[in-house]
Amino acid sequence: MPLTDAQVRTVLRPHRDGGPISRLYATGEIGPGLHTALTDLASKLYATDQDEESQKIEDVIGYVRAVGGRPPVRGWLDRR
């Protein structure tokens, strides 16, 4: 089942990076560098035996692929 916008924010909350992951978390923007940042994060989590958290990031990667690129979303923080 695809993630909701609120679920994406919940997954990303502890992984804000001041860059593309933070932009998706705060504004819903899917832009350059996001896929790479998420893939790197998932790999790092997997390498440190955080398999469940890594899988959650993989789910966000699926969400990003399904949605495609987009500018910041008006009302993003209120979306469910």
Image: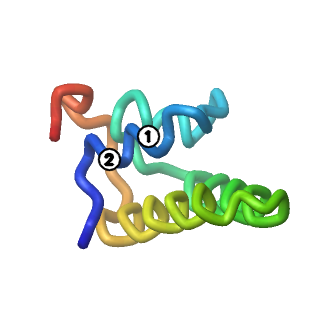
Q: In this view, does 1 lie above or below 22?
A: below
Helix, strand or loop at disc 2? helix
Q: Which residue is tagged 1?
A: 24
Judge the density around disc 1: few (<14), some (14-19), many (≥20) Cα neighbours within 10 Å. Answer: many
Q: Classify residue 25 by image quadrant.
A: top left
Residue 75, image x and y in percent? 17, 27
Q: In this view, does 74 lie to the left or right of 60?
A: left
Residues packed near mark 2 inside 10 Å, few (<14), some (14 to 19) or many (20 plus):
some
| Residue 27 in the image: above or below residue 60 | above
Q: Does 12 sit left or right of 33 as displayed?
A: left
The mark total stands at 2
- Looking at marks 1 and 2 on the same chain, the residue that comes earlier in the sequence is marked by 2
Q: Are marks 1 and 2 in contact (CB under 8 Å)?
A: no
Q: Nearest the camera: 62 or 71?
A: 62
Which residue is at the far right?
47
Q: How far apart are marks 1 and 2 (CA)?
A: 12 Å
Q: Which amino acid does label 1 sit on?
A: Leu
Amino acid type of disc 2?
Gln
State the residue position of label 2: 7
Q: Which of the colour schemes (rainbow, by chain, secondary structure, one colour) is used?
A: rainbow
Question: Hey, which quadrant is residue 60 in on the image?
Answer: bottom left
- Position above or below: 24 against 75: below
Mark whose residue sits in front, 1 or 2 = 2
Q: Residue 10 carries which label?
A: none
Q: In terms of secondary structure, where does tag 1 sit?
A: helix
* Residue appearing at x 83%, y 64% in the figure: 47
- Residue appearing at x 36%, y 31% in the figure: 27
Relative to 71, say whether 61 is above or below: below
Give whichever of 19, 4 is nearer the camera: 4
